[in-house]
Image (cartoon, grey):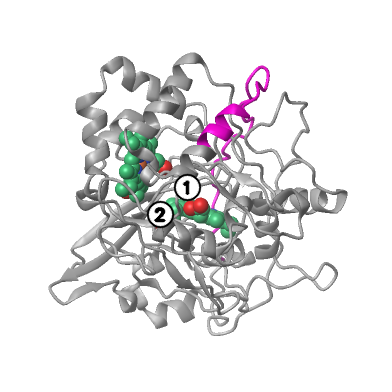
Amino acid sequence: MHRKTSKALALGVAATVAIGTGFAQSQIQQSQTQLQSTQSDSGTQSRTRPRAPRIRPPAIPNLPRAGIAFGDPLQGLTADELADFTEGLEEFQSQDTAESGLGPIFNNVSCVICHASPAVGGVSANFVTRFGHSANRGFDPMTAAGGSLLQDKAIDPAALESIPRDANVTTRRITTPLFGAGLIEAIPDSTIMDNANARKPDGVSGKVSMVQDAATGQMRVGRFGWKAQQASLLTFAGDAYLNEMGITNRVFPTENAPNGNMTLLAKYDLVDDPEDQTDPASGKADIDHFADFMRLLAPPSLLALSDDAKAGAALFVTTGCQACHQAAMATGANPVAALDRKVVMLFSDLLLHDMGSLGDGIVQGSAGAREMRTSPLWGLRGRNAFLHDGRAVTVDAAIRMHDGEAAPARDRYVNRLSPALQRQLQAFLDSI
Ligand code: HEC
Ligand code: HEC
C-alpha cells in the first residue's frame, strides 16, 4: 500500500466533522428548453450580424442552508471573489438563442441544463455522443465529418448532424459534476506526475495525460473530463461553449460545420465570430465568468462517518481501490486564498488507466481507446448514474464493471467481501 495516501486518508477521516442536518436539496428546476428558431430572412445568408443578449435566469433565492451544500461557493472568499462567483453562476444559467449565437449545431442551450443536479454545477440525465472509426491502422476521430463529438440539435432542421454511416465506434458520455473543480485545477502538474511514478499494488500503472492547453498554448497535465482531456477550467469552458452550445469564443474561435459541411455552415452561422465578446467594462467574456463560477464552487463536503462508513474506509484501502482512487492531493500556491495550499479529498490520482473492456473506444487527447481518467469519488451521493456512459445505476454495479488494471481490486470486492462488508464500503463512498 502506498503509505503517503493511506496517511492522507486517515487524516481526512479523522478530520471529519458533523455538518448538521445534511444538505439542502437543490431547488433548481430544469426549465424546459424552448428553442427559438432563427428567422430565415432570405438575402442575409452570407452576412453575419452582432450578437443579441443571452436570456438571463430568474434571480436565485438566497435560502439559508445548514453546513456546506452542493452548489455553495468555497468558504472564505473575499467580497470580490463572491461577486465573481455570483456573476459566474448567473452566466452559467443564461440561455443562448440563435440570435445570441447558439449553434448552428449544438447539444443544449445553457451550461446548467446539463450541469443541474443536485445543485447548479452538478449533473443531469443529459449525455453526449462521441463517434469515430477504428481500424488496424488506429483510431480516426472523423474530424472532417464532424467527429468525434456529435451535436444532436440544430437551429434549423436542415443543418442537423447525424452519425456518419462508416463510424464503427459510438459511445455516450454522461455529464461530470463541477463541485470542487477549482481545487482540482489548483493541483500542481508535478503532483499528478509524481502519482504516475509512485509504486502501486496489483500491477496498476497509470499514465499522465499531457495535453496542450488551448487558452495558454502550454503543455499541461490534463485532469478534466472522462479522458482527462483538458487541463484548465477556462479551456474547458471555451470547449464546452463551442462544442456543446455552438458559441465561438476567443479560445475556440472556429464554428463547427454540420458533419463538416461548409455550405450548410455558411448558410446558418448568422452571428459574427467570435460570438462570445469580451465586455470592455469588466474585461471578461462569458467563458471567463463560467470559469470563475466553476473555480469558486465548493467541493462536496465530507460527511460524518457512521461506524459502518468507518469500517468501509478501511475496506476501501485493503480492497485496493486506493491504488487509483487516491484519497487526497494538495493544491499549490494560489492567488485565491480559498484555493491556496489546501488538501483536496477527491479520491482520484487524476491519471489515465487501461480499463480493459470498460474503455469507451475513443482516442482523445493523450488517452487511448481503453484508457479512462480515474473518476474522483467525492460527491457520489449526489448522482444516480455512474461510469462514463452511465451504464451503472448503483455504485455497487459500477465497481463490478471495473476491468483491466482494476480487475484485481474488483475481484477482491466481489469475491472476498461479504454483502455486509460491501455495504460498509458503499456507506463510506456515500459519505465522501
Ligand atoms: C449537452 C450537455 C452539456 C452542456 C450544455 C454542457 N456540458 Fe459540461 N459536460 C457535459 C458532459 C457530457 C461532460 C463530460 C464530457 C467528457 O468528458 O467527454 C461535461 C464535462 C464538463 C467539465 C469537466 C468536469 C470534469 O471534472 O470532468 C467542465 C469543466 C464542463 N463540462 C463545463 C461546462 C460549461 C462551462 C458549460 C457551458 C458553457 C457546459 N459544461 C455545458 C455535458 C454538458
Ligand atoms: C486501476 C484503477 C482503478 C482501481 C483499482 C479502481 N478504480 Fe474505480 N474507477 C477507475 C476509473 C478509470 C473509473 C472511470 C471508468 C469509466 O467511467 O469508464 C472508475 C470509476 C469508479 C466509479 C464510478 C465513478 C463515476 O464517476 O461514475 C466508482 C464508484 C469507483 N470507480 C469505485 C471504485 C472502488 C470502490 C474500487 C475498489 C474496489 C475501485 N473503484 C478501484 C479506476 C480504478
Left or right: where 198 falls relative to 294: left
Give how far across and how far down residue 140 sits, in percent.
Answer: 25, 74
Asked whether the residues under the numbered discs 1 and 2 touch, taking CB atoms below 8 Å apart as contact, a structural biologist would say yes
Q: What element carries label 1?
A: loop
Magenta residue check for 199: no
Give how far across and how far down residue 151 sits, in percent.
Answer: 40, 62
* Residue at the far left in the pictured view: 136
Q: Does the residue labelled 1 lie within 8 Å of ligand 1?
A: yes
Which residue sits at x=71%, y=62%? 53
Start and end of the magenta stretch? 9-38
Q: Which amino acid does the dot numbered 2 rest on?
A: Trp
Work out whether 293 lies above or below 247.
above
| Residue 386 showing in the rendered view | no
| Residue 89 showing in the rendered view | yes
Which residue sits at x=39%, y=31%? 316
Which residue sits at x=27%, y=38%? 409
Instruction: Report crowding for label 2: few under 14, some 14 to 19, many 20 or more residues within 10 A (C-alpha).
Output: many
Give how far across and how far down residue 331 sits, in percent.
Answer: 63, 54
Magenta residue check for 10: yes
Q: Is mark 2 within 8 Å of ligand 1?
A: yes
Left or right: where 221 falls relative to 150: right
Instruction: Report crowding for label 1: few under 14, some 14 to 19, many 20 or more residues within 10 A (C-alpha).
Output: many
Identify residue for label 2. Answer: 226
Which residue sits at x=58%, y=81%? 44
Quarter holding residue 167 = bottom left
Residue situated in front as seen by the camera: 80 or 145: 80
